[in-house]
């Protein structure tokens, strides 16, 4: 079945460490997105990529970085510069003007 | 700048009650509109979408939404809710021709059996 795979499901990180969240899709979608979901704040866009080797900052890109070397993959790195990284991270993809397909998310906790 | 407002943050209903969740957006151009649902422990799923045509759109599981352009609204409705509708509901807006979506803050619905 086509879909988006995010791994790991739960991730713990020590303060000061960088961590990379994986997002892989086999839907052949061009556009991919990273959102952060916090209670009461909905989904906020971190980064998005319309095509391979190209990406744009979203509304809350500070402290995050991404790459898009392959169409299927859009990893997100949460750097030590992100002041409040504990959150639920969602990856999504989209083809054309249609709705998103979401992954199941990664819950990151900084300890 | 675009924004999406969901007025009800928490809604509690009894089974068989009717549901209406509000969604208003601010954007002067043409938009695509979406409602997503997140059931407990599951990932976000598309409930329904509006691109053009009949402003009353029907989605999965008996949900429908009406686009009222003059009010910049896209309210979600269901005539009779079930316990299994307990979830968080998100409205989203996409300015036509762009890749960016804006999500509302979500509405947590709890349906009492």
Image (spheres, coloured by chain):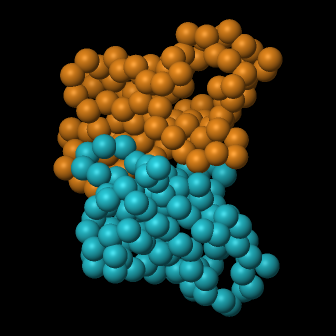
Residue B108 is drawn in which quadrant?
top right
> Relative to residue B101, is residue A61 drawn left or right?
right
> Relative to residue A68, is residue B85 drawn left or right?
right
Seen from this angle, which residue lies furthest bottom?
Answer: A16
* Front-most of residues A21 and A42: A21
Residue appearing at x 70%, y 46% in the figure: B41
Which quarter of the rendered picture does the C terminus of chain B lie within?
top right
Residue appearing at x 41%, y 71% in the figure: A73
* Front-most of residues A73 and B76: A73
- Pinpoint residue A70: horizontal percent, then vertical percent: 34, 76
Residue B100 visible somewhere in the drawing: no
> Relative to residue A80, is residue A10 drawn left or right?
right
Residue B56 visible somewhere in the drawing: yes
> Relative to residue A25, is residue B39 drawn left or right?
right
Say which chain is cyan: A
The relative height of residue B5 versus residue B78 in the rendered view (above or below) is below
* Front-most of residues A42 and B48: B48
- Pinpoint residue A60: horizontal percent, then vertical percent: 47, 68
Say which chain is orange: B
Residue appearing at x 29%, y 19% in the figure: B55
The relative height of residue A59 versus residue B103 in the rendered view (above or below) is below
Q: How many marks?
A: 0
Residue appearing at x 71%, y 67% in the figure: A10
Seen from this angle, which residue lies furthest front?
Answer: A1
């Amino acid at each position: 079945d086509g879909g988006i795979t995010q791994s790991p499901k739960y991730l713990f990180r020590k303060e000061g460490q960088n961590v990379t969240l994986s997002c892989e899709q086999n839907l052949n979608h061009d556009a991919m997105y990273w959102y952060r979901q916090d209670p009461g704040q909905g989904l906020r866009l971190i980064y998005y990529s319309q095509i391979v080797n190209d990406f744009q900052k979203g509304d809350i890109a500070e402290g995050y970085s991404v790459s898009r070397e392959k169409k299927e993959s859009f990893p997100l790195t949460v750097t030590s510069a992100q002041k409040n990284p504990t959150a639920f991270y969602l990856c999504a993809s989209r083809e054309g003007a249609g709705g998103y397909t979401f992954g199941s998310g990664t819950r990151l906790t900084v300890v | 700048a675009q924004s999406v407002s969901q007025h009800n943050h928490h809604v509690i209903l009894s089974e068989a009650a009717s549901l209406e969740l509000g969604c208003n957006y601010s954007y002067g151009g043409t938009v695509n509109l979406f409602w997503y649902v997140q059931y407990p422990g599951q990932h976000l799923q598309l409930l329904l979408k509006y691109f053009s045509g009949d402003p009353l759109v029907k989605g999965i599981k008996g949900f429908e939404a009406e686009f009222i352009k003059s009010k910049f609204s896209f309210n979600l409705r269901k005539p009779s809710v079930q316990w299994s509708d307990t979830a968080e509901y998100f409205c989203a807006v996409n300015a036509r021709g762009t890749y960016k979506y804006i999500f509302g803050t979500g509405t947590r619905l709890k349906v009492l059996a």
